[in-house]
Amino acid sequence: MDEKCLALDLGGTKLLIGIVERAGRIVFSRRYDSPLAGGQSQREIAEYMLACLDDFMPAAPMEGVTCLGAGVVGRVDGENGLWLEIEPGRCETVGLARMLSEKAGLPAYIDNVVRCALRAERVLGAGRDLDDFIYMNIGTGIAAAFVTGGKVIKGHSFNAGEVGHVAVDVFGDVECPCGRRGCAEAIASGSGLDRRARTLRARYPDTRLCFPADRRISAKDITDLAEQGDALCVKLKYDAAEAAAALIMNLVWVTDPETVVLGGGVVSDERMFGDIVSRLNPGSMRFAAGGVRLSGLDPELTGLIGAAMCGFQLP
């Protein structure tokens, strides 16, 4: 019987819990709402995760499950099982691995969600056999994980990879929630596209873009309308591709990777991926011999599979 892991993937839009085999096959899963946007503290969100486990485990095929792995947003000290921060203002030290272990009766391991996705790419995806590469996720937000000389860079404060707050338009008028202007995340992420569309709406009264009150505007809707010539959506898509390409080139100059792997819901649309790649300067990319690749893993499931790889303690 293939060894299995109880995995949790806490992102900006969902909490996904599943049973995952070591080979990456998801045996069973359930989706729950993510509480991240509600402003709760880490401890409150941890308690919510435990409550979801109470709902999940009685229905799940737990036979053969030997460990638990969880990916969460923010700063994570994986070696000590501590969740340190969601964002500035939501910072407390929570022994999340211990809490999950006690709830599930399994050894538990945690890491940042993007470093979990990196594990999935290293074990099963485009990062196999690569000692120097960047995995960058463009979804609700933007973040990256780096492998340099075969080692994952975590940083002194476990904050390495928050590249969404690299400014790519320092003289622009796009303000990021972090307080800076021109951050890549404020221009090219799913949340950034939504905020920017609403901010610019009054300048484009003829736009056909819908502005739902109860959910985020989808990047797909923006791309679809951009292809039909909607002026607002053309600007949003053009600027997003420019920002993402600038960010990639900045990172390539810093870490000198062989390959850059892109994942996440926004960039999984091959139209957006193609726009980004077309804006990469050959001079900046000349040493990245493996080029820029789109992840072959399902963006909805990469985090869950990566959380399982964390639980199995695979690199």
Image (cartoon, rainbow, N blue to C red):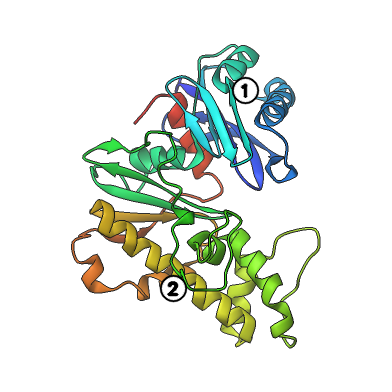
Q: Amino acid at mark 1?
A: Pro
Residue 1 location in percent, x, y?
Answer: 46, 19
Residue neighbourhood size for the residue with mark 2, other residues' Cα within 10 Å, grouped as few (<14), some (14–19), many (≥20): many
Give the labeled residue for mark 2: 242
Q: Nearer the viewer, residue 93 or 49?
A: 93
Whole-number angstrom distance, CA of label 1 to CA of label 2: 46 Å
In the rendered structure, are the residues bearing label 1 and label 2 in contact, judged by CB atoms less than 8 Å apart? no
Q: Is residue 209 above or below residue 46?
A: below
Q: Residue at x 59, y 11 (%)?
A: 105
Q: Quadrant of residue 154?
A: top left
Q: Is residue 104 left or right of residue 268?
A: right
Q: Earlier in the sequence, mark 1 or mark 2?
A: 1
Number of residue marks? 2
SS at circle 1: loop
Q: Residue at x 57, y 17 (%)?
A: 63
Q: Residue at x 71, y 78 (%)?
A: 201
SS at circle 2: helix
Could you tell me if residue 267 is visible in this image? no
Residue 173 location in percent, x, y?
Answer: 57, 73
Q: Amino acid at mark 2?
A: Glu
Q: Is residue 302 left or right of residue 260?
A: right
Give the labeled residue for mark 1: 61
